[in-house]
């Protein structure tokens, strides 16, 4: 077999090891109820089609407000600091979030995530995302308008038609900057900020 030659500057990029994102988390009781619902969704999917979905554990359930990137070899300090400045500038009162439907982020015929979504009950999440986005933009972080408020319930699920579900509702009183150890199903809280602004 011929030896693989590498040209200077064209080395294969390193695989990402660390992710950075803003998130909100449900309270423990709400998370437990959502996790139970996710497990039931997987049981029903398996009975219907034989697909073995992977439900998220209660402590992993969250809403990603803004993904800031995946990086190889650790998190860049300048991006972390820019994120912290943007978060510190947010002025919002606590709000209630409500997800009232289940949808699929899969594309037929591929398997993908099943998620909770909502309509009127997710306006607070959108406002918080927009406030963070404005702060990040002021700090030179590229804008990302692709935000659909949702909570992932399970992975490896077949495509499903969006349908109503028992509402998952909680009060959002803080948000967090999270460090994801990619491939190791572990999230580390880097900082939290309470919502204490004017309503």
Image (cartoon, rainbow, N blue to C red):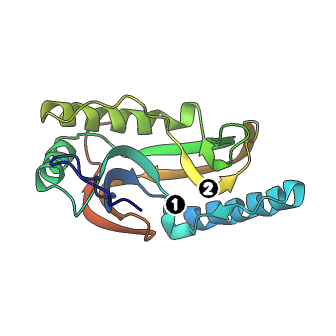
Q: Nearer the viewer, residue 196 or 108?
A: 108
Q: Residues within 10 Å of mark 1 (few under 14, many from 20)?
A: many
Q: Residue at point 44% right, 34% down?
A: 147
In the drawing, does residue 190 fall left or right of residue 81?
right
Q: CA distance from mark 2 to mark 1?
A: 7 Å
Residue 33 seen by the camera:
no
Question: Could you say where residue 98 lies in the image, as x and y percent from the top left?
Answer: 57, 44
In the drawing, does residue 12 fall left or right of residue 149?
left
Q: Quadrant of the C terminus?
A: top left
Q: Secondary structure at mark 2?
A: strand
As drawn, 192 above or below 112: below
Mark 2 vs 1: CB contact within 8 A: yes
Q: Nearer the viewer, residue 146 or 52?
A: 52
As drawn, the label of residue 153 is 2
Question: Could you say where residue 95 lies in the image, as x and y percent from the top left?
Answer: 42, 43
Q: Residues within 10 Å of mark 2 (few under 14, many from 20)?
A: many
Q: Nearer the viewer, residue 33 or 105?
A: 105
* Residue extending farthest front: 2
Nearer the N terminus, badge 2 or badge 1? 1
Q: Quadrant of the N terminus?
A: bottom left
As drawn, 46 above or below 101: below
As drawn, 195 above or below 37: above
Q: Secondary structure at mark 1?
A: loop
As drawn, the label of residue 108 is none
Question: Could you say where residue 23 lies in the image, as x and y percent from the top left?
Answer: 38, 52
In the drawing, does residue 182 fall left or right of residue 58?
left
Q: Residue at point 62% right, 51% down?
A: 168
Residue 23 seen by the camera:
yes
The residue singled out by tag 1 in the image is 61
Question: Could you say where residue 156 lies in the image, as x and y percent from the top left?
Answer: 66, 56
As drawn, 119 above or below 15: above
């Amino acid at each position: 077999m011929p030896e693989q030659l590498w040209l200077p500057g064209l080395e294969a990029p390193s695989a990402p090891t660390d992710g950075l994102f803003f998130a909100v988390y449900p309270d423990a009781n709400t998370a437990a109820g959502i996790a139970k619902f996710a497990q039931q969704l997987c049981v029903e999917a398996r009975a219907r089609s034989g697909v073995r979905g992977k439900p998220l554990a209660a402590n992993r359930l969250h809403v990603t407000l803004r993904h800031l990137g995946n990086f190889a070899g650790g998190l860049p300090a300048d991006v972390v600091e820019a994120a912290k400045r943007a978060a510190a500038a947010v002025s919002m009162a606590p709000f209630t979030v409500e997800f009232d439907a289940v949808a699929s982020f899969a594309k037929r015929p591929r398997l993908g995530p099943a998620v909770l979504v909502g309509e009127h009950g997710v306006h607070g999440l959108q406002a918080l995302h927009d406030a963070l986005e404005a702060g990040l933009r002021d700090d030179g972080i590229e804008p990302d308008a692709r935000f659909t408020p949702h909570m992932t319930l399970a992975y490896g699920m077949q495509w499903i038609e969006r349908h109503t579900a028992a509402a998952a509702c909680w009060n959002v009183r803080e948000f967090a900057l999270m460090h994801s150890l990619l491939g190791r199903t572990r999230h580390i809280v880097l900082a939290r900020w309470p919502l204490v602004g004017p309503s």
